[in-house]
Amino acid sequence: MPGKYDDIIDLERPVSRRHPPMPLEERAAQFSPFAALTGYEAVIQEAARLTARQIELDEDAKQELNQRLTELARRLEGSDGPVDVELSWFEPDGLKLGGEYLTRRLSIRRVDPVCRLLELADRSVIEIDRILNLRLEL
């Protein structure tokens, strides 16, 4: 039973006189993967990035923190400049729900009990409600 392509199956591959054969590396590059969904990898990495939930302090921890804030305010009244502290606070994530806890040595310039803010020496602020721990430097 004769096949549909029996007349051409044994012929040699045609070679162009105008175009020289392409090197194997370049031929392989034609079939290499391409980024069909630009930015998809970044979206997957962002979705996989873990964030923490903000811890709700119990009443005893809130009372202890308020005592330390009061002591900090007293020290600021009696000093000419900022007071150094070690502060742990929750920093919300700008892209997704949750955030991370940071612990840094900072210079506090002012305690604002009305707006519930700590003003740092560089004029940035941290909300008191996001503070986990405050340790006054001696």
Image (cartoon, rainbow, N blue to C red):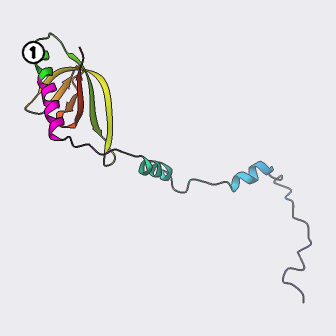
Residue at the limit of the structure toward the front, as seen here: 60
Which residue is depicted at the point 22% across and 43% down? Answer: 56
21 is higher (above) or lower (below) than 1: above
Residue at the limit of the structure toward the bottom, as seen here: 1
Q: Nearer the viewer, residue 89 or 37?
A: 89
4 is higher (above) or lower (below) than 38: below
Q: Nearer the viewer, residue 63 or 43?
A: 63
Residue 23 in the image: x percent, y percent?
Answer: 80, 49
Amino acid type of the residue that numbered disc 1 sits on in the rendered structure: Glu
Which residue is depicted at the point 84% across and 83% down? Answer: 4
Task: Kindly identify which residue carries mark 1.
Answer: 77
Residue 15 is a magenta residue: no
Residue 51 in the image: x percent, y percent?
Answer: 36, 45
Which residue is depicted at the point 51% across and 56% down? Answer: 37
State which region is magenta. Answer: 51-70
Residue 61 is a magenta residue: yes
User: How many marks do you count on the picture?
Assistant: 1
